[in-house]
Structures are given as structure tokens and as C-alpha cells.
Amino acid sequence: MKINSISLRKILDSRARYTVEAEINEYSGKAPSGASTGTHEAKCFVPEDLEGIEEELKQLEGKVIDQKEFDNLLRDIDGTDDFSRIGAIGIACSLAFKQASGFEHGKEFPLPLSNVIGGGEHGGNTSIQEFLVLPVEASTFPEAIEINRKIYQELKEKHKRKIKGMNDEGALITGMNDEQTLRALKEIADKHGARIGLDVAASEFFEDGKYKMTSLGMEQKPDDHYKFIQKLIDVFDLVYVEDPFDQEDFRLHAKLSSKNPDVMVCGDDLFTTNKDRLQEGIENGACNSLIIKPNQIGTVSDTLETVELAEENDYTPVISHRSGETCDSSISDLSLEWNCPVIKAGIADIRIAKLNRLLTLWDEQESPEVYRK
Ligand code: PGA
Ligand code: ZN
């Protein structure tokens, strides 16, 4: 693709903080940001000298290059391993380039995994960060959205006296603790044939060798925390468990995956969309699924390499938003291009940009694939 023009600007994100929008040939890419970030992630901040870096990028105008070459040039301009110099500009430009060069949409739509009640770093009463629903009985993408929407609305109605608001991801903040939340959610999810998932985001409460779940008044050593997670899987018939243990603990992730082959044991902070970290996981047997967040690794082509390594090794890629978001819906298009079977993108507030993009794409497809049961 020929780069005719590149420009940058500061825009607001869903937390009323600044992030970066890049425009390439008038196509936009916007950088999201995390709150519960993994230590191995690429850096994603707004650099002070946006104009100076924009001048450097303008030297690429006139070049005819592909995505991989463009992403390599972004890394050269940055000059560090983890985008420590140009921060959020890297992923904003990489997404804008992808938008400008177009997507190749496959026919298989992802199942939406929706955060309906939240806590942890995103705000809420629970130590577990996300209580998620997966509409496993749905036949079509619109039906899947309808199931998750109903669960969210019914939770809101049934527990209205306990609801205090919405957190960073548009999930409900309630007065319930983790176990009460799971019981309340199970009742409603069962009614709609949906299964429950958790993003434990355990690194956020792992301190001095112990898992400190203050919402439950619990402080446990790793092996006891393992038993607690196994109990939650068994009692609540969990279909999905993300980051149940600390981001350096490949061993416990491997043990949980081998004991629960039918559960999606998913690494987010553990892998940070980094193919070397994923390779280490594959060698250790840790997890059977991973979160795919393009800004964790910094470019679209590096993200694709991680998706390919996952697929070659039967790890299910779950493409995901961040807690700090914009109305950029690139991950929706990428989910179809990369055949990701699951998208984690919330259900309310600015998250609808991703879901509505998929609803539009569903309508535009001549014969979209229904879900395999
Ligand atoms: P983050 O949270 O975007 O704040 O990292 C999302 C997640 O942990 O999945
Ligand atoms: Zn996570």
C-alpha cells in the first residue's frame, strides 16, 4: 500500500485520559490502554513530543510497503524493544495502516464473551476482576448478543438495590462479594443457557507469595488458591478461567489446564500477546487459550504471529478490548480475518463500538456461518 499521508492527534479515551489517534490515508487507528497490565507488555502512553514524532513518521509518506514492513519501520523509529519511546503511537499507526489496507473477512463469527459484573482494578466490590458470560447455545451472532444483553439487563433489574454503578469496562458494580456474585450470575446465566467465565487477574492481588482476596477476607498460599479456583470451576461449572494465578507461575497454569481439559484456561498477563512467552507456555503445557490484545505487543503483524503460533498449537485465541477504550473497532474486523472463535469486548458503554461493528458485518455477509455446536 502507498502511504499518502500520516498524522497524529491526542484524543480522549473512556477513562477521560488522553490516548493517540493516527490517521493514514484518512483511515483511523486509536490506541486503547490497560489498567491491570502485565509486566511484559509493550508500553502504551502518550509521548510528550507528539509533533516531533509525527515529523519523523511523515518521512514514510510516499513509500509503498506492506503491513510487516510498516510495523518494522515503526519499531526502527521507536528504537526500543517495547515501544518505550513512541508508546501508544506504535499501535495507533499500525491499526491505521491495517484499516487503510483493508481486512479479509472470513465467514466465522466469534462468540462474544461479555463482562457483566466487575471488580479488581476496574472498580467494584470483588477481588476477581471480571465475571463473564459466554452464550454457548446461540446459533448466530445477533442471538449471542441478545443472550448477553438479556443477562446484563436481568442482573440490573433483579439486583437493583445492590447495584452501585458501572466500572471501567461498563460492567456492573454491586455490593456482592465474589461468591455471592457467582451465585447471582449462575441463576440468570442458566436460564439463558449461557456459561460463566472469570478473569481472575490474580497478579493484581498476589503479594509476598500470597493471594490476598480482600473481598472474601482470604489470604492463601498458591496451592490453597489453586484449590479455591478448582472449587469455583466445579461448583459454578465455569467454561472459562483467565489469569487464575500470578503472571510468572507457568506451573499452576499447567496443572489447572491438564486437570480441566474442557475448560478454557486462558493466559492474558501470563502471555501478553508475546509469542516468546506463548512458546514458553506451550513447552510447559500452561493454558489452552490466550488473550490477544494488539497493544500488548505493539503492532498488528506481531499480533498475527502470536495468533498463528497459538493456532498451530491448539491454543484458542480470544481477541480482546482493554479497560481504557475508544470507538476503534479494529479488533472486530481482525476477529473475522484471523478466525478468532471468541471476542471479549464487554456489553455496555463504549464497548458497543466493537459489538455493533460485528452486527453490521453480520448483516453485510451474504451467508455468515452459524456457530458450530
Ligand atoms: P486491562 O484489563 O485492559 O485493564 O488490562 C483487561 C483484562 O485484564 O483482560
Ligand atoms: Zn485479563
Image (tube, rainbow, N blue to C red):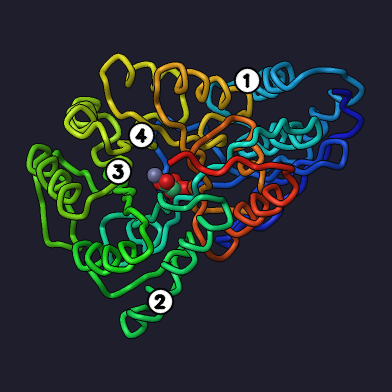
Disc on the earlier residue, 1 or 4: 1
Upstream in the sequence, badge 1 or badge 3?
1
Q: Is residue 16 above or below residue 328?
A: below
Q: Amino acid at mark 4?
A: Gly
Select label 1 or label 3 by which is in front: 3
Report the amino acid beneath label 2. Lys
Instruction: Identify the residue under disc 3.
Output: 241
Which of pointers 1 and 4 indicates the residue nearer the eye? 4
Mark 3 Cβ and ligand 2 under 8 Å apart: no
Looking at the rendered image, the quarter that the N terminus falls into is: top right
Q: Which amino acid type is marked by label 3?
A: Val
Quarter of the picture holding the C terminus: top left
Q: How busy is the neighbourhood of tag 2: few (under 14 within 10 Å), some, or many (20 plus)? A: some
Is 289 on the left or on the right of 17, as rendered?
A: left
Q: Secondary structure at mark 4?
A: strand
Where residue 121 appears, x then y in whole percent?
37, 56
Residue visible at 16% across and 48% down in the picture: 234
In the image, residue 101 sits, relative to residue 276, either above or below, namely below
| Residue drawn at 48 percent across, 47 percent down | 344
The Cα atoms of the two marked residues, 3 and 2, are separated by 24 Å
Looking at this view, is 64 or 229 the one in front?
229
Within-10-Å neighbours for mark 4: few <14, some 14–19, many 20+: many
Q: Position of residue 324 (x, y in %)?
A: 54, 53
User: Which residue has dot 1 on it?
Assistant: 79
- Residue 292, percent from left and from top: 49, 35
